[in-house]
Image: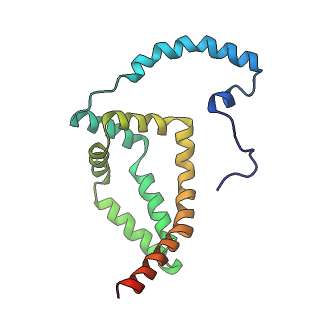
Amino acid sequence: MQDETRPKRSCSPIRRRFAATSRTAGHILFLALLPVCLSAAPAAAEDPPDTPESRIEAAKTYIELVPVERMSDNVARNIMLLVPEEKRALFRQGVSEGLAEANIEDIMVKIVANHFSTAEIVAMTVFYGSPEGLAIQKKLPGYTADISLHVIPIIRKSVTDVMEKHFE
C-alpha cells in the first residue's frame, strides 16, 4: 500500500537527489562527480570469479546481512495470521522448536549459492546493505502480511473452486 501522505514521484532518482538544490547547482555537482563515477565504473563492472567456493563465501556474507531468523520470523508471522487465534501460541512454539533443531543458516547458504551467481549474490548483498534495501527489509513483513491476508485466500478459493468443478 502506498503512503498517501507523500507525493507521487514522477522524476528520475538522479533528479530527486538534486531536487533540494537549484538546477544549475545540480548540473555542476553532476559534472564534478562524473569523472569519479567513470573511474570507478571499470572496477565495479568486473565480476568476481563465479566458482562454487566464491558463491559459498558470497552467500555467507549475504546471510550475515539478511539473517535467516528474520526471514523465518517473517514467514512464520505471516502464516500465523492464517492459524486460528487460539492455536497461535502452540504454532509459534512448534515452529521455534523446529527451526532450532534445523541448521537453517547452512541450508540457506547452500540454496543461495545454488541459485545465484557470485556477482548476483554480491549485488543482493550490496542492495540489502543500502539504505533502500534496509528500508525494504523493514517494510517486507507488512507487505507479506497483506499478501497473506488478502491474496492467498483468493488464490486458495480459486484453487478449491477449480478442484471441485473439474477434478471431483
**In the foreground, 68 or 51:** 51
Across and down, in percent, residue 88 comes to: 48, 74
Percent x, y of residue 164: 41, 86
- 23 lies above or below 135: above
Q: Is residue 67 above or below residue 96?
A: above
Which percent across, then down, holds residue 161? 45, 82
Q: Toward which corner of the image does residue 21 lie, by quadrant? A: top right
The residue under the point 52% across, 40% down is 133
Location of residue 30 by image quarter: top right
Q: Is 130 displayed left or right of 110 in the figure?
A: right
Looking at the rendered image, the quarter that the N terminus falls into is bottom right
In the rendered structure, the answer to whether residue 29 lies left or right of residue 108 reads right
The relative height of residue 55 versus residue 68 in the rendered view (above or below) is above
Identify the image quadrant of the C terminus: bottom left
Of 18 and 109, nearer the camera is 18
Q: Is residue 52 above or below residue 155?
A: above
Determine the residue positioned at 63% across, 28% down.
14
Q: Residue at x 46, y 16 (%)?
A: 40
**Nearer to me, 30 or 129:** 30
Q: Residue furthest front?
A: 166
Position in image of residue 112 (x %, y %): 32, 45
In the image, what residue occupies the spot 38% across and 40% down?
62
Depth order, front residue of 100/136:
136
